[in-house]
Every structure is written in structure tokens, then in C-alpha cells.
Image (cartoon, rainbow, N blue to C red):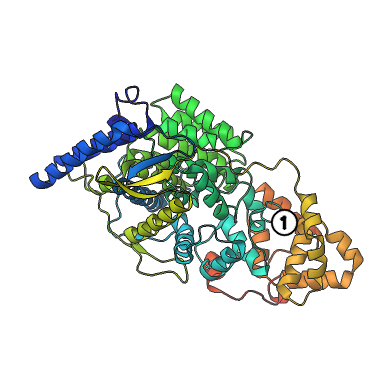
Amino acid sequence: MGLNLLRRGEKDARPDLSVRYYGFITYIYVLKITRIGNDMRRKIANMSILLCLLAGFLPKASAQEKVRIPVEIVVDKIRGGLLGQILGNLNGLPHEMRYIGEPGNVQNYVPSLPEGAHSDDDTDFEWFYVYEMQRSRQIQLDAGYITNLWIERVNRGVWCSNRFVRYLMDIGFKPPYTGYTEFNPWAEFNVSGQFLCETYGLIAPAMPQTAAKIGLNYTTVAVNGEPAQTTQLFTTMIATAFVENDMNKILDAGIASLDGKSKVRLIIDDVRAWHKENPIEWRKTRRLLRDKYTQENGGIRDYNGYELNTGAIVGALLYGNGDFAETLKQAFNWGWDADCNAATAGAVIGVAYGYRRMMTRGGGINEPLWQIVDRYKNVTRDGMPEDETITGFADRLIELFELINENNGGGKKVENNVLVYEIAAERPSPILALATADRKEALRKEFAEEIRAGLSGDSRAARAKAAFMAVCLEMDEQLKKTDAATWKAACYDLSGYWKVMNNVFAGDFRGLDDFSKKFERAGFKAPLNRYEDDEIYEDRELWKDPRTIYHSSSPSK
């Protein structure tokens, strides 16, 4: 039974946010009574009555007004959101990038992790951030800390914008410049803004502004502009799902978090309008989305871009009708970057469902049991635990939520014999605005002195970084005229950072074509080989003699 079906007939009668929430939870507790013994049944029935009474005097949440939610429920929803994210990611992998022009045709889907979960980029970036946030007791890790973490831990299982970021760090780049389009052409459209943000909504229940601030600190390592708007959108939706169960109202909250000029708003408006016109025919809505928002004939710019994938997530949540398995099945069938989309949708609907409900689903004649083994095996991230569990991962999120809640003026207390969290609720609001002016000239002024000093610096990485920045900012011709020998030597140093140069020339979208042409004009050439993933991951040598990796002479010859 879907979330909206549980609340049928109660929306108008209970307009109060907190009352709607407790009514929903009570229904779940009563629903589960039929599956347990008499003693436990009486205990849960008593709890249900208590929650109903509690709901009667809770005030409506407003900006900075404290809401009170039983600890047991918040914890259950954090665990449910994480499990939903993991299920969407790993159950979605077989569908990743498989349905581009046309949708998939998955008919039956039962959420399951019979061998447990394993790390994947949809969850493991957040995992190592969460691990360090918990260890250091710092929520907003700074740029230097983040850079060191990436260099230590992100050495395999990394693609697209994140791969570009990782090897920029080898020559001294730090966030947020790693996520600037001027230095990273993937940052303009890449989906990292959405598939790397979900857990930050989970650690800020009912605090959407806080969730967005935390999320942006980490996703802008790899993206900016419109993709960063999706971070605000989905962290807000997840934080809101703790206190709201109507999907359209969750979407409204997400929209309120966006810059008024954001294209993401238009995408959501379109999908909602098409859903209203075609409430059953999801394939028609998917076709309309594809036809309007395809940018480059269905290539990587499209299936790795925020437009189609954001629309697919919204479509899955609407056509899923509040049912967890149906929502994920929709995300698989809408296609494009399906595992990422299912992970994000799964986090939203997982919060709504809660962990207990998910773990007790199935087992009936017409509903197979959801087989979920509590394991999160590390197969991707260096320096991280090998023996993590899903519940252990969730425990870290719960601890961070308590730290954030305390920092925001909330706490934990006993009220009417129930242990509750008191949370300073926030209204959704934009945290990051879209840039309104060309940033290139400002960056030239900001980095002019660093570039000049770096070209003749003592460090090979510093010289390489200076040459890279100069080409990106179109300062290379003037610098070459000023000191040809120094410029030539710095270009030689840069050309030996083979993973950086592979990034510059490996890819197929217009933005990267324009980017690589700048380097060609400056005298750089593509490496002799297009390196396979395993070659890139297994060879940890940062710099190679340029004479061994190019078709012809390097820029210094």
C-alpha cells in the first residue's frame, strides 16, 4: 500500500503538518499489529493511542519553530532513507545507461539485497565524508581536508566530473575551483549534484536549509550552476519527507529551494503538468521529457546530464504513487542514469516508508519477501572500513543528525513519557544563487599573480597547475610572449600529468570539445592511448616522461 493511500481521506481533515505526520505513523503501527504476538500487540496499541494523543496538541511547524518527533520515528526514517538510497543504487545498476531513446520495460521488481550491499559511487563518496564528519565532529569539512580525503580515498570507481576533479587535485587544485566550469567542463551539466547529495538530507530532518548548505559544501567539489541547484532541490525534498508525506508538497518544498531563474524549476513544472495530463501513461510523459530536454542527440551530455535525469526522478516519484517498489521500478524504466535516479528517488520514498516497514514487507502469497542482508562491503574506497554494515552506516548518520540538531538549537527530551527530538524547523529557501555574470574575467584577476609565480615555481605540480589555469582562462598567449622559455617548461611539466591530459582529451560532448581545443591551440596533444579504467586506477604514477605518451613531440620540443 502506497504512502498516499495510507493518508486517503485525511488531508483536509488534518491540515496541521505535525498532526498529519503522527496520523500516518499511527496507521503504520496499527497495520503491523496483525503480524505480532498479543503482548507486543498491546504495547504497540498503547503506543498508537499515545501518539494520537500527542498529535492533538502539537503546533504547526513554521520557520524556526521547534517541532517534536519521537526519537524512534526519526531514527527509523533515517535508516529507511539510507536503505532506500542503497536499494535504488544497487538494484538499479543493471539498468544504468541502458534506456536512452526509449524507456525500459521492467515489469516486476522486488527490492532485495540477498548478498548485502557494496560500495558504489552513488553512496561511497557520502560514506567517506560521513565517516570523517563523525570522526572529526565537524560537519563542514574545509577545502584542504576534502582534497586530502580525495587523494587518499578516491583512486578507483570514479567517472566523469569526479574523475576530472580527482586528477586536477594531483596538480594542486582544491574545491570549489575543481567544480568550476572554467576548469572542469563536466561541471556544467553532470549529475553529481544529485547523486552525491542524499545523505545530507537524511542528517537534517525538517531542516532543509541546513541540508542544502551541507550538501553544497560537498557536491560543489564537482559541479556548479544548474547541477548545484539539484543539490538544493533533493536535499530539501529529503529533509521535508520527515514531516510531510504528500509527494506534491514535498516537490513544492524542493521548488522553493531553487533560484528563481533555475532551469530545474521549468523541468519540474513540465513533468508535473505532463503527469497531470497523462496520469497513467508514464511513457508519454517520458517521451515529452526526452523530446524537450535532450541536448546532444542522446549522447553522454544527455544521459549524464541533470535535465533528463532530474525529470526522470520527479516522474518516478509521481508515477510511483507513494509505493516504494513501484517508484524504483519507474526510475529504472525511465532510464538514462537509472541507478543514480533510483538512489535519489529511493532516499525520498525510503524516508516516507521507514526502515521497519521496509524490513517487514513481503512474505505473503502475492508479495515475495524483501531479502535484505545487513552488509555494506567496501570495494571502492581506500582507507575505509572493510566490515561496514548498512545499519552501521545509518548509525553514523544518526549521530551526525544529533550533532547538527544540537548545533541548530534542538535537542532530545522526554515529553508525555515519550523520548522526542526537538528540532528547529526551517522553511525551504535558496542557499546558492545562479551566477549572473561571466566569471572568467574575475578569475583572471583572482589568479593572475598565482599563475605568474607558479610558472617559475619550485614545484612541478605548481608549474603544471599554472599552465593549466592559464590555458583555461585564455592567458597563455600573453604569458608565452612574456617569457617563452618559462612557459615552454611549464607546459612540458603539465603534459607529463597523463591522467590530467587524458581527461582533457577523453570524452564526447560539445563543452569538452571546446575545452580541448584551447589546449590544442596552446600546443598540447592527446596522449597516444585512450587509457582504460583499470589502467588509470592501477597505475598510481602521477607523472610520466611526455616523450613516452604522445603521438609526437611534447609542447616543450
Placement of the C terminus among the 4 image quadrants: bottom right
Q: What is the number of callouts on the image?
A: 1
- Of 362 and 143, which appears nearest the observer? 143
The x, y position of residue 110, in whole percent, is 28, 45
Question: Residue drawn at (61%, 76%), measured in percent from left and top?
Answer: 541
Question: Residue drawn at (39%, 58%), measured in percent from left and top?
Answer: 399
- Of 230 and 331, which appears nearest the observer? 230
Q: In this view, does 455 lie to the left or right of 125?
A: right
The x, y position of residue 294, in whole percent, is 58, 38
The x, y position of residue 350, in whole percent, is 35, 45
Is 173 above or below relative to 109?
A: below
Placement of the N terminus among the 4 image quadrants: top left
Is 355 above or below relative to 135?
A: above
Question: Residue drawn at (55%, 65%), measured in percent from left and top?
Answer: 150
Q: Can residue 365 be seen in this view?
A: no
- Of 4 and 545, which appears nearest the observer? 4
Amino acid type, mark 1: Ser
Q: Name the residue under label 1.
A: 516
Question: Residue drawn at (67%, 76%), measured in percent from left and top?
Answer: 544
Q: In this view, does 173 lie to the left or right of 420?
A: right
Q: What element carries label 1?
A: helix
